[in-house]
Amino acid sequence: MTRGSLLVDHIGELVTNDGRDGDPLGVRRDAALLIEDGQVAWVGSARDAPAADRRIDAGGAAVLPGFVDSHAHLVFAGDRAAEFAARMAGERYTGGGIRTTVGATRAASDDALRASVGRLRTEMLRQGTTTVEIKSGYGLTVADEARSLRIAAEFTDDTTFLGAHVVPAEYADRPDDYVGLVCGPMLAAAAPYARWIDVFCERGAFDADHARAILDCGQAAGLGVRLHANQLGPGPGVRLGVELGAASVDHCTHLTDADVDALAGSETVATLLPGAEFSTRSPYPDARRLLDAGVTVALATDCNPGSSYTSSMPFCVALAVREMRMTPAEAVWAATAGGAAALRRTDVGRLTPGARADLIILDAPSHLHLAYRPGVPLIRQVLHNGVPR
C-alpha cells in the first residue's frame, strides 16, 4: 500500500500532549494534522491545513494519541475464571494462582500461544492501544521463557523478561537455586528477545535481596529495569526500583511517605494498574497522593488471566478517575504520555511533529467522555503508524 500523505481534519478537540500553554494535554480546538511516512508531519488549525493525497474527516470528534499500555502479560494459555469467581465470593487474592497458568502455558504449543497473543493484541488495538509492553513469566523454565519472549517479540518491541514472576513448584524448597537459574541460563536464553527485565518483588514471590541480584544481572546483560512492587502490602520494592534507576515501578498500591518521596525525587514512573484492584477487590492506589507529590504516573491494564483479565485502556481510564482521584485529563495523559515515559519512549504517546502517527478518533467530542461514559465503545477509528486499522 502506498502511504503518501494523509490529512486528518475537522478535529473538534485534538490532544497533542505537547504541554503548550501550561496544559499537559496540549489541547487544540478546530484542528488538523498531517501524516507522512507514518509520522506526524504537521499540526495546526483546520483552516490552515495543507493539501494531502488522502483525507479523513473527523467530523468534529476528539482525536487522541494511541494508548500506550506499558504493563501486560499476554503470553499465556488457559484462564482462571473459577479463581475470579471465588474472589468475588470472598476469597482473598494472594498471587498463588500464577502457578496454574504456568502449567497451562508450558503445555501449550507455540502456535496456540501465538494465536492467544494475537487475539489479545487485536482486542487492544480495537480499543485504541497502539503500543504495548509484553512480559514473559508464565513459562519459568529456560526454554519456556525464551519461547515466550520470542513470540512476544513478534507483536512488540517492548518485551520484558519476567522469569522472576514466582518460584515454580519444582523449586519451591530451593528458591536460591531458582534465582541462580534466572540469573544464569534463563537470562542468557531470554536476553536476545528482551528489552527489559522485571521481578515480582512481593511476599510470596521474591524478596529484596533476590530481586536486587536478578535486576543487577539483567542490567549487566544490557536490559532496562522494571519492577512489580508494593501490590499486596508495604515493602522494599519501590525504593529498590528507584535506587536501581528503574524506568517504572508498577502497582504501587501500598506506599509509605518514604516511597512517595523516593519516587518524587527520581525519574522512575509509578505505573498504576486499576484493573487489578477491580478484579481482586483490593484497595486502589492513591493516584492523587502521587500526583500532588510530583510523581510521574502511568496507567496500564496489567492484562493477565488471573488478576486483571482486561485489555481495555478506556476501562482503566474510567477506573482511575472514579476510584483513584485522577482528573480525566490526568488519566488520559497517564494512559498515553505516561505510558510512553514508563517505556522511555519519545516517539509515542504524543501527537506532535516527528512522533509516530498512532492516533484514535473517538465517537465523542472530548476526551472527557472516556471517563464520563464508562463501558461504551467510543473508539471510532484507530491509526497505527499512520495506517487506518
Image (cartoon, rainbow, N blue to C red):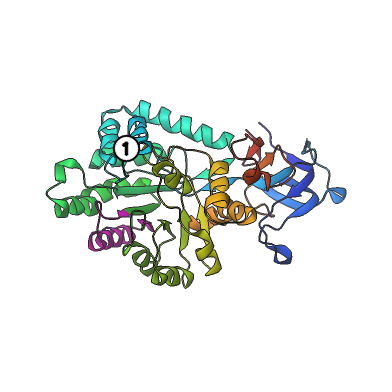
- Is 352 positioned to the left or the right of 281 in the image? right
Which of 108 and 347 lies nearest the eye of the viewer?
A: 108
| Residue 205 image point, x, y percent | 25, 52
Element under disc 1: helix
**Which residue shows up at 76% across the image and 54% down it?**
28
Q: Residue 191: within the magenta? A: no
**Which residue shows up at 73% across the image and 44% down it?**
62
What amino acid is at disc 1?
Arg
Residue 41 appearing in the image: yes
Q: Residue 221: within the magenta? A: yes
| Residue 270 image point, x, y percent | 46, 60
Q: Residues within 10 Å of mark 1 (few under 14, many from 20)?
A: many
Residue most extreme to the left:
173
**Which residue shows up at 43% across the image and 37% down it?**
309
Q: Is residue 243 above or below residue 388?
A: below
Count up the numbered dots: 1
| Residue 388 image point, x, y percent | 66, 34
Quadrant the N terminus occupies: top right
Q: Is residue 345 above or below residue 105?
A: below
Q: Is residue 221 above or below residue 256?
A: above
- The residue wearing badge 1 is 147
**Which residue shows up at 40% across the image and 39% down it?**
304
Quadrant the C terminus occupies: top right
- Is 365 positioned to the left or the right of 278 in the image? right
Tell me the quarter of the picture where residue 346 sits. Answer: bottom right
Residue 38 appearing in the image: no
Which of 301 and 113 lies nearest the eye of the viewer?
A: 301
Q: Which residues are magenta?
A: 200-229
| Residue 240 image point, x, y percent | 34, 66
Tell me the quarter of the picture where residue 17 sits. Answer: bottom right
Which of 149 and 176 lies nearest the eye of the viewer?
A: 176
- Is 38 positioned to the left or the right of 274 in the image? right
